[in-house]
Image: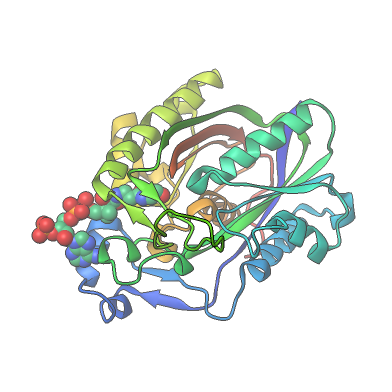
Amino acid sequence: MSFTILGTGKAVPEYVMTNDELSTLVETNDEWIRTRTGIAERRICKNETITELTVKAANAALENAGIAAEQLDLIICSTMRGENITPSQACIIQKEIGASCPAFDVNAACSGFIYALDVADGYFVRKKVKHVLIVSMDNLSNIIDWKDRSTCVLFGDGGAAAVLGEGDDLLSINLTAVGNDEVLRIPHGTNSSPFYEHEEQRAVLHMAGNEVYKFAVHAMSTGIKKAVADAGLELSDVDCVIPHQANIRIINTAAKNLDIDKEKFFCNVQHYGNTSSGSVPLALDEASRSGVLKKGDIIAMCAFGAGLTTGSCVIRWNKDGKTES
Ligand code: UT7
C-alpha cells in the first residue's frame, strides 16, 4: 500500500513582474532572460504572506480532493523559510485550516515536494495515516539579491499542495543528496548572540549557475531514467513528465538525453520562473486542472536543488480529467 493523489491546489501572489520591469532594476533584458532561461514573468509577494499562500493552496487541494481538514492524519510543509523559525509552517497551516493532526516541515530546497512524498509514503506503508496534506511553498523574493542579475531574474514566489489518500499509485521514488554548500546556499543573516565570533554573512542566495546547471541536467536525466526503471517501466511508457521548473534549457536537454518527446514535459517556467519547492506541485496542479493529465497516465516527476538534493518518482494518475481552474 502506498498512496494516490486525491487532489491538488495552487497559490501564487497576484503581482506579475515581467522581464521588462526587471530590466529597470538590474542590467538585463527580456531577450537574454527568455533565451537563457525560458522565463517571461514571475509572481512576487507584495501583500501576501507565506502563511496566506500555504493556507490558500491547502484549502484548494482539500476542496479538489473532497476531503475535510478534520480528516487529515498528517500535514507536511516543504519550505526553506516559513513564517517563523518555530513553530513550523505546517503547524501554522494546521491551525488555520482547522485540522488537528501532527504537522512538521521538511527542507530539501527545490526537491522538497518529492522528499515530502517519500516521507508521506512511509506513513502510508506503516498504516499510520489515511489522508496526508503536503504543502510546498517558498517565497524566494525576500532572500535573493535584487542587485545580482545572475540570480534575481531566475526566481519567483508561489507553490501548491496535494492531498494524498490510501492507494497504489506511487510506483517508484528515489531521493539523493550530495552535501555541498559551495555552489548553492542561502546563509542565515544575523546571530543575536553577543558571544558569537564568526563574521556574519548576507542572507541572500549565492549560486554558481554553471555548476548547478551541469548538476541539474545530470540529475534530471539519471533521476527520471532510474525512477522509470524502478517502476518496471520503459521511458516510452511515460505519458507526462513534471520537471522542476528552473530553466527551459535544462528541461530540453534532459528530454534530448532521455529521448522523450519534448511535448511530454509539462512546462510553466515561462509564467513563474523557479519557485523552488513549489515548482513541481505547481506544475502538477496546472497540468491536472488544464486537462493535460488523464486518468491512468504514467507521470514521472523530478527535482533538484540546494543540498545538493534530488528527488524523482513515478506515479499513476488516478483522477478524472479537467477540473475547474
Ligand atoms: O533550483 C536550482 C537552482 N538553480 C538552477 O537551476 C540554475 C542553473 N543554471 C542556469 O540556469 C544557468 O547557468 C544561468 C541561467 C544561471 C546562466 O546561464 P548561462 O547560459 O550559464 O550564462 P552565464 O552564467 O555563462 O553568463 C553568460 C553571460 C555573462 O557575460 P559574459 O561573461 O559572457 O560577458 C554574464 O555576465 O551572460 C551574462 N549575464 C547576464 N546578462 C544579461 C548573466 N546574467 C545576466 C542577465 N542579463 N540576467
Q: Quadrant of the N terminus?
A: top right
Q: Position of residue 28 (x, y in %)?
A: 21, 71
Taking the image as drawn, is residue 219 in sight? Answer: yes
Q: Quadrant of the C terminus?
A: bottom right
In the figure, is residue 95 to the left or right of 50? right
Classify 233 as above or below 177: above
**Residue at image x 76%, y 56%?**
91
Taking the image as drawn, is residue 259 in sight? Answer: no
Q: Quadrant of residue 270?
A: bottom left
In the figure, is residue 63 to the left or right of 248? right
Looking at the picture, the colour scheme in use is: rainbow
Q: Position of residue 304 (x, y in %)?
A: 44, 41
Q: In this view of the protein, which residue sits in the foreground, 325 or 219?
A: 219
Classify 284 as above or below 16: above
**Residue at image x 51%, y 43%?**
111
Q: Quadrant of residue 294?
A: top right
**Residue at image x 64%, y 34%?**
118
Q: Residue furthest front?
A: 195
Classify 177 as above or below 189: above
In the figure, is residue 154 to the left or right of 79? left
Quadrant hosting ligand 1: bottom left
Q: How many marks?
A: 0
Q: Position of residue 71 (x, y in %)?
A: 88, 50
Q: Position of residue 172 (x, y in %)?
A: 59, 26
Q: Quadrant of residue 12?
A: bottom right
In the figure, is residue 321 to the left or right of 198? right
